[in-house]
Amino acid sequence: MTTKHINSILLVFMAIAVLCGCSKDALDYRKYLDGKERIYPGFPGKVAAAPGNYRVKLYWKASPDPSVTRYKIFWNNSADSLEMAAPDRSVTDVSVVIPKLVEYNYSFTIYSYDKAGNKSVPVQISNVKIYGDSYKSSLTNRFLVSASPYVLDDNGITLNFERPDTINIATEIRYTYKDGTIHKSALGPDANSIRLADYKSGTKIYFKSAYVPVKSAIDTFYTADFDSLSNIMVPVDKSLFRPLKLANDVGTYVSETSLSKLWNGNKAPTEYPDIFHSDDKSPLPHHFTFDMGKRVSNLAQFEIIGRECCNNPTQFEIWGIADLTGAETLSPGNSAGWTAESKGRGWTLLKTVERSDDGSAPFKVTLPEGLPAMRYIRIRVIKVASGNANYSNISEISFWNK
């Protein structure tokens, strides 16, 4: 036998040995699969979650595998699960809502199954935050601008809100029309003010805000209750005001500068003769008196606007009384006994006002709570910015009540 023949025989034996070895290894998996072939159906794609109120919505792209007949979702370390049938083949977007969860971070695992019970490789979505009462308790209604929460006029009211500091989607507002009916309006998250036409002055306004924890959330969360804008200050109707001239009241400089100039609607300091200008017959302190036309309850705020240039009150007192019977004071305004006599005749000191500027700009003061109803007002001017001992000048005065 030649060397060539020996080598050929060796190669044949080696090939048989390799084939036998490979055949044995290829069948080793059978002892793990009970002699069956492992099949993995197609798995879901693009899984995402949208949280809600103690629930979550999971959604994904349907498996393209035509053998898939159902899906099963597991959570709580597979202690809980939910199963659903695969939709018709024409449906490509699949979703399911899982209810009765707790306020916690969850992980969900989704499998697809075929009719024989074979399941796909797992698809997982982790750190899904569920929201509930704890999140809801952290919500507050949108805040009104503290410096200027509203602007009231004859035709309605405008509310001014701060910007929301989380994902606010709306604020519901309930208010009373002039005809007494209740109306609703809504303030969007990008708006900071809202106009309520035909609002009935003095009535409460209620508002309640709605939020979502994330933009994809499936539920809207509301604050626990309505807040209210109450005790809204209403301008006292100056069309009813009338000048008075009681004993020892200061006179006016000329007829064009009478007391009636105090309520002609000025919004800024004005100049002579569109002002009240006292005469020089009653040295400071001196006082003047006017009638508001009817009794006004709950006086809450007072505003004074001085003259453009001079003699503006920087220290003065505001007095009030409901009935003038026996109320005229016999002491001059600059006498030591004037205060005691005024109180003895039934006048109430509403406010002592001092300002450190030149007295020209509009200047508001808050009046004490619980004041009795007033009809007649007396302003006692003690000092003016110019230092003049006789004259006082004012452009406008206004009152508000609640």
Image (cartoon, grey):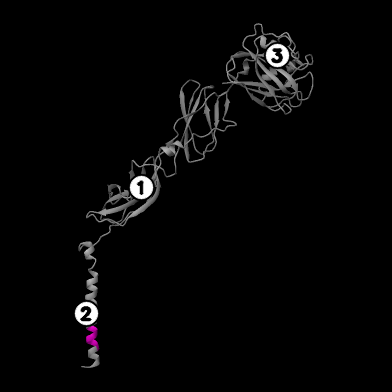
Q: Label 2: which residue?
A: 16
The amino acid pointed to by label 1 is Leu
The quadrant of the picture occupied by the C terminus is: top right
Q: Is residue 326 left or right of residue 252?
A: left
- Predominant SS along the magenta part: helix
In magenta stretch: residue 59:
no
Q: Which mark's residue is nearer the viewer, 3 or 2?
A: 3
Residue with the most extreme bottom position: 2
Question: Tag 2's secondary structure?
Answer: helix
The amino acid pointed to by label 2 is Ile
**Region of the chain picked out in magenta, as a range:** 7-12
x, y (%) of residue 116? 22, 55
Residue at 24% over, 77% down: 18
Disc with the residue nearer the chain's start (2 vs 1): 2
In magenta stretch: residue 9:
yes
Q: Is residue 173 left or right of residue 146?
A: left
Residue at 30% over, 53% down: 111
Q: Which mark is residue 25?
A: none
Query: How busy is the neighbourhood of tag 1: few (under 14 within 10 Å), some, or many (20 plus)?
Result: some
Query: How busy is the neighbourhood of tag 3: few (under 14 within 10 Å), some, or many (20 plus)?
Result: some
Q: Which mark's residue is nearer the viewer, 2 or 1?
A: 2
User: From this viewpoint, is residue 354 visible?
Assistant: yes
The quadrant of the picture occupied by the N terminus is: bottom left
Q: Is residue 46 above or below residue 251?
A: below
The amino acid pointed to by label 3 is Thr
Tell me, yes or no, whether the two marked residues, 1 and 3, touch with CB atoms within 8 Å: no
Question: Tag 1's secondary structure?
Answer: strand
Q: Label 1: which residue?
A: 58
Residue at 52% over, 37% down: 191
Q: Which mark is residue 339?
A: 3
